[in-house]
Amino acid sequence: MCRKAWLAAIVLLVSLAGAIAETPLPGDPFPSNIIRIYKPLDVRTKITYGDLWLSATIGRFDELRGRMDIRYVETLPQSSSPDLSGARLYQILNFTQYFNLNRRKAGFCVYPVKWIAMRDLGQMQLRVTLIVSDDFRTPGNEAQGLCSANTYRLPAQ
């Protein structure tokens, strides 16, 4: 009986430690281990993409089909780019499948989105940039690599 109680206590502690580790830090708008819902600040973004459901491993826009399986790659260096300077970059692992589900959506990218960059704007706002080029360091418009850049806010949780 004592051994079972000991094992139950260990399982409870491990569960609690995992829950604490998954809790995002206050004031940190970046993806964490739990899914959080980000609201677009622009009406056009709301119509085209909708809310952004985001964790450290998945992303989903309300107005698009399917989900993006993402993986953190790196934090980009400071630069003159208003969308990419200091942004955290995530690779979209299932970009072909995700694109095929949404290729006919008006206002969505005409090429597969391979990267998603997120730049902290302060006040729980993120600049979310979708990148279609193979090399995410390519600046410019969609023909040169960028598809869209929209601002989202994480409401108080």
Image: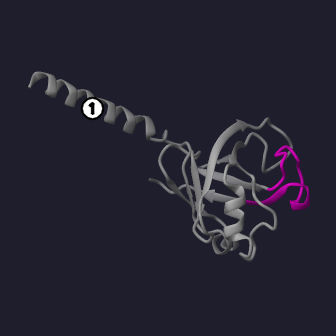
- Tell whether 13 sits left or right of 91: left
Instruction: Where is residue 20? Give x, y as percent.
Output: 39, 36
Q: Please, what secondary structure does the residue beneath circle 1 have?
A: helix
Residue that appears at 8% across and 25% down: 1
Q: Quadrant of residue 65?
A: bottom right
For this rendering, which residue is in front, 38 or 72? 72
Span shown in magenta: 132-149
Task: Name the amino acid type tagged 1.
Answer: Val
Q: Does 137 lie within the magenta span?
A: yes
Q: Does 147 lie within the magenta span?
A: yes
Residue that appears at 59% across and 49% down: 123
Residue that appears at 83% across and 49% down: 134
For this rendering, which residue is in front, 139 or 64? 64
Residue identified by numbered label 1:
11
Instruction: Where is residue 130? Give x, y as percent.
Output: 74, 56
For this rendering, which residue is in front, 101 or 154? 101
Helix, strand or loop for the magenta stretch, by majority: loop
Instruction: Where is residue 127? Give x, y as percent.
Output: 70, 53
Residue that appears at 72% across and 59% down: 96
